[in-house]
Image (cartoon, rainbow, N blue to C red):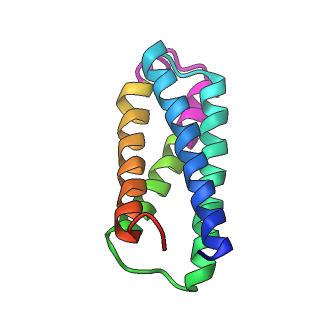
Amino acid sequence: MDTTILIGLILFTFALLVYSIATWAGVISGNLKKWHLILFWIGFIADLSGTLAIGSVYGKFVQNTHSYLGAIALLAVLAQNIAATIILLKVNTKWIPTFPKKISLPVWAIWTASYIAGLILSGGSR
């Protein structure tokens, strides 16, 4: 396996880990907290870095279900992170308790579906 692809896969798996911890901690606690947001941004950076690493191997956008779902998922995470940042900065008490279930959980599901699609399409390895 190409080293760059391996690095990308490690970054994606790390992103899955931190996205999952942040999302499920928010769902279980019933509140969006600052440390959840920090993990969301760390996950986004890992996800974007993994995407750029693997993209550098192919040199182009590969058109398949995983690529399109991955692009949608990455943009959804970015939108979620921006919204969560605004909510916490403005201390929006209406959205703090509802954000994890209404926003984070669906975004996590889309992102996880993309991760699984990538595993299936690659056969678990390249």
**Foreground of the two, 120 or 92:** 120
**Foreground of the two, 71 or 64:** 64
- Which residue sits at x=61%, y=32%? 37
Image spot of residue 100 (x, y percent): 44, 26
Q: Residue furthest left?
A: 65
Count how many numbered circles sit on residues in the image. 0
Report the magenta residues as a range.
81-98
Is 95 inside the magenta-drawn segment?
yes
In the image, residue 69 above or below residue 17: below
Tell me the quadrant of the picture where the N terminus can be found: bottom right
Which of the 4 image quarters holds residue 34?
top right
**Foreground of the two, 75 or 47:** 47
Image spot of residue 124 (x, y percent): 43, 63
Is 116 inside the magenta-drawn segment?
no
- Which residue sits at x=61%, y=34%? 85
Q: Is residue 17 visible?
A: yes
- Which residue sits at x=48%, y=31%? 23
Image spot of residue 67 (x, y percent): 41, 70
- Which residue sits at x=64%, y=42%? 41
Q: Residue furthest bottom?
A: 59
In the image, residue 112 above or below residue 62: above
Q: Is residue 30 visible?
A: no
Image spot of residue 38 (x, y percent): 67, 34
**Foreground of the two, 119 or 26:** 119
